[in-house]
Amino acid sequence: MDLLKTLVDKGLRRELPTREEALAVLATSDDDLLEVVAAAGKVRRQWFGRRVKLNYLVNLKSGLCPEDCSYCSQRLGSKADILKYTWLKPEEASKAAAAGVAGGAKRVCLVASGRGPTDRDVDRVSRTIGAIKEQNQDVEVCACLGLLSEGQAERLRSAGADAYNHNLNTSEGTYGDITTTHTYADRVDTVHQAQAAGLSACSGLIAGMGESDEDLVDVVFALRELDPDSVPVNFLIPFEGTPLAKEWNLSPQRCLRVLAMVRFVCPDVEVRLAGGREVHLRSMQPLALHLVNSIFLGDYLTSEGQAGQADLDMITDAGFEVEGSDTTTLPGHRARAAEGCGGHTGGGCAPCGDASEAASAGPPAEAVPDAPVDVPVGVPAARTDLVAVRRRGAGTDLAPNA
């Protein structure tokens, strides 16, 4: 297929596809799906080999959020029967993080519901970061605390944070349909603050909220422009008790096409398979490893994931390997850029290295492995049985899933 050859060539050069090409990926047929996965897999292996980075979530404060994000089980007015608790103590959060690190996680993501942290909250999280780093000095720590105020990103970095997550979630044009208590521009500003402070920026999207193909391409192109180091791709978990509870729009094939499109648009970025993968990809999760180079291990913020050991087995069985703490995740040109300029924008890092240097930095592309051919078709019926509320780990007396 000429489209896929063009996209592979562009991905190996870190060149931005056209909007028409990105839309064409989403419009490919199920008959062509394995070709799409194989093509995007060449780009993934060029920049990241067969490594899979593991990340582990610690929900520092669950529920009772004043924001009205329609997709979120912690939102204002949510009737979802989730765990609700106030701030974990630093030692509690450190214990939860240690479980993830023991399971192979290279990065711990500290998340707290709310519009954004107060200065007292930043102090609290800073102590938590210190407690985690004291026990696991090589682990990366990413904070996700909502909208940042002036100076807070710098304080988090001084405390030892390596990264900051704040997702765009959906396109600017549809953002007001999903959230009214803050704006798309607020989110962009927070990512810029994190980058300016020298934190590695992490920003992604949620697919499956009823958006169009054009909306998906809009948000992914916006992310390319924003230039985060990590792009988590979430698939909506339709929690009962939230406004989007009836939005069951995804099939495994649709999810794979979305991931492939993200990889072509953001070829040398850490693309992370995030929330909802078990619900929507199901038995086709291993195919997604040919597109992404990062996943969350075990449970999510308010929902259960598959068993941590099942994640590890899946990675091994699919012919991939867990990325060690002594390995730099990003390709050489991006790692140098992050160290040299403390944040960069513009869909690449031209000021920090050209494309010819980048091509030599990544591992060589490999032959595409044979893939399963028995692929189901059609959008399945709602699988509410797969949406399980988290009842273990942080905020409970039960052992975490890692």
Image (tube, helix red, strand yellow):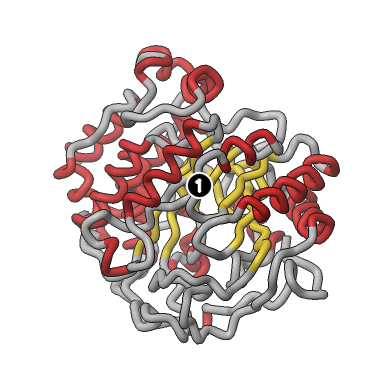
In the visual, does 276 lie left or right of 157? left
In the visual, does 137 lie left or right of 37? right
Question: Which three-letter amino acid code belongs to the residue tagged 1?
Answer: Ser
Name the quadrant of the C terminus.
bottom right
Name the quadrant of the N terminus.
top left
Q: Residue at x 30, y 33 (%)?
A: 8
The x and y percentages for residue 322 are 65, 42
The x and y percentages for residue 293 are 52, 42
Q: Which residue is drawn at 19% across and 50% down?
A: 23
The residue closer to the viewer here, 370 or 205, is 205
Can residue 341 be seen here? The reply is yes
Give the SS element for disc 1. Answer: loop
In the visual, does 126 lie left or right of 346? right
Q: Mark 1 points at which residue?
A: 149
The residue closer to the viewer here, 361 or 376, is 361
Q: Which residue is drawn at 60% across and 43% down?
A: 53
